[in-house]
Image: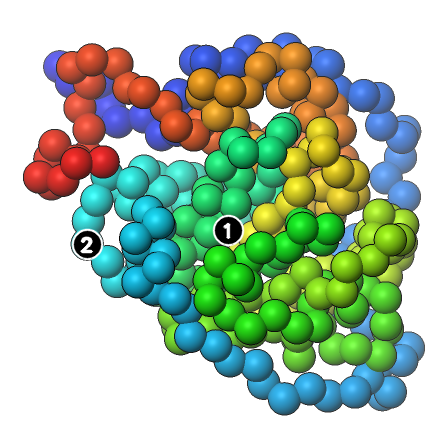
Amino acid sequence: MTEPRRSLFERAADVYDFNAAARARLPGPETNTRPPLDGGRRSTDTARPTMPNRRGSVARDALTAAGFVMPDGGVTAIAEEFRLVKRQLLQAATAPDATPRDRMLLVASALPAEGKTFCAVNLALSIAAEKDFEVLLVDADVAKPTIPALLGLEDGPGLMDAIADPRLDVEGCIIRTDIGNLSVLPAGSIRNDATELLASDSTRVVLDRIATQRTNRIVLFDSPPALAASPASEIAHHVGRVVMVVRADRTGETELREAVALLSGCDDIRLLLNAAALASGGRRFGSYYGQVG
């Protein structure tokens, strides 16, 4: 009997001793001092300036040529892999006991060049194909933002600007794209005090507003590598789960454990195996659909 198809989450567990990584987490505070989600209301709401709706067209041809999955594209091996991944994430985000925080996901990696942004964008594009959800892709790599340029969108005010200025409405910074269910929040201004701002209560207020503004919104944060920059560890405190991208031919066990320890502000960390070579003779979606993937 053919074994059921397993996702890249499950195959990652075969490659890495994730339980050992979890055991290596740094001890956290005894109590959670961050208040629960409250809708992100501020006393300065009446003074918040309004911004015109920002819209943009995604560079579909360039993304397709680079191997990204288009919501209206054909069925390919990589498209099916990300369908499996997103299904598990959506089920967890919409469980009966789920909270708005569970709809916020951080895509991270231990080191650069492990495919984190590739996976974050593909997850967002795959979720955008859903009928009952919309997805907000947040460029949280605040020192080296790449998402707007990668998607062919005009950059502008974004996450860090809304956190730094309580009068700025974060919803007004969001770019609505011509892919119906996909929106993008740029990183915003590059700041020397980015880590301190992300550790401030203003971040909680802004992210609470993002999470509660639309009940069908899934928020994906593309963060910098955990071992290369500190913002990922701060954002981890606010999300329901972390998707840790591990490159099959690159990520070491030691680096993985260190990264997981830094992201221990989130209790649910899942591994996503990237660039995996499947066992000889294993079934692949590409062979079923007549595609090479």
**Circle 1 sits in a helix, a strand or a loop, which is it?**
loop
Quadrant location of residue 267? Answer: top right
Residue at 50% x, 51% y is 94
Quadrant location of residue 265? Answer: top right
- Indicate the amino acid at tag 1: Thr
Residue 99 position in % (x across, y down): 64, 52
N-terminal of the two: label 2 or label 1? Answer: 2
**Circle 2 sits in a helix, a strand or a loop, which is it?**
loop
Residue assigned mark 2:
74
Q: Nearer the viewer, mark 2 or mark 1?
A: 2
**Number of marks in picture:** 2
Q: Is residue 159 left or right of residue 68?
A: right
Pointer 2 with pointer 1, Cβ within 8 A: no
- Indicate the amino acid at tag 2: Gly
Mark 1 is surrounded, within 10 Å at the Cα level, by few (under 14), some (14 to 19) or many (20 or more) other residues, namely: some
Quadrant location of residue 187? Answer: bottom right
Residue 219 visible here: no
User: Taking 195 as reference, is 63 above or below it?
Assistant: below
Residue at 79% x, 77% y is 168
User: Taking 123 as reference, is 169 above or below it?
Assistant: below
Residue at 81% x, 64% y is 163
User: Taking 101 as reference, is 82 above or below it?
Assistant: above
Residue 266 position in % (x across, y down): 70, 36
Residue 85 visible here: yes
Residue assigned mark 1:
94
